[in-house]
Amino acid sequence: MFVSVVIDPGGRESASNLAEVLTANGFERVQHACWESVTINDEGLVTLKQDIDRVTDYYDIVRLYQYPIQDVLAITTLYKKKWRRVLVRPPVKKTEN
C-alpha cells in the first residue's frame, strides 16, 4: 500500500515528534512536510495512527493519503484531535440508451 503523510504541526515540538514517529515507522521525507512509504501494511497503519495520536495535540493537523483502500483512494485527516476519513471513488460512467 502507498501512504503519503502531510503534516501541519502546531509547534516545533510537535513537528519534531511527528518526524520521529514517521521515521520510526519506515517513512521517508520527500518534501518539507510530506512523508511517504510504499512498504507499510494495514497493521503498521493502525500503529502509525496510534503513535501520531499520542504525539499530537489539538493544534496539529495530519493528513494521510492511502491507496489502495477498498480499491479507492482514502484520505484520512486528524484535525482538532479527531480522525475523519473520506473514500474517493472514480466517477460513475453513464450508459447510453
Image (tube, grey):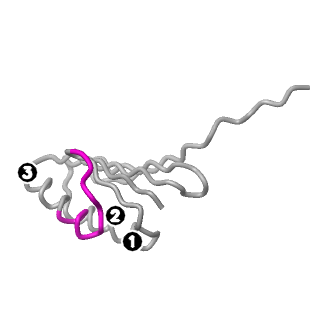
Q: Amino acid at mark 1?
A: Gly
Q: On the picture, is 7 further left or further right than 88?
A: left
Q: Amino acid at mark 3?
A: Arg
Q: Earlier in the sequence, mark 1 or mark 2?
A: 1
Residue 13 rendering spot, x and y as whole percentages: 8, 56
User: Which quadrant would the C terminus be assigned to in this image?
Assistant: top right
Q: Earlier in the sequence, mark 1 or mark 3?
A: 3
Q: SS for tag 2? A: helix
Q: Residue furthest left?
A: 12
Mark 2: few, some, or many residues within 10 Å (few <14, many ≥20)? some
Mark 1 and mark 3: span between their CA atoms? Answer: 25 Å
Give yes or no for contact between labels 1 and 2 (Cβ–Cβ under 8 Å).
no
The residue where tag 1 is placed is 44
The residue where tag 2 is placed is 49
The residue where tag 3 is placed is 12
At x 33% / y 55%, what residue is drawn? 36
Q: Amino acid at mark 2?
A: Lys
Extent of the magenta region: 20-31
Q: On the picture, is 77 further left or further right than 80?
A: right
Mark 3: few, some, or many residues within 10 Å (few <14, many ≥20)? few
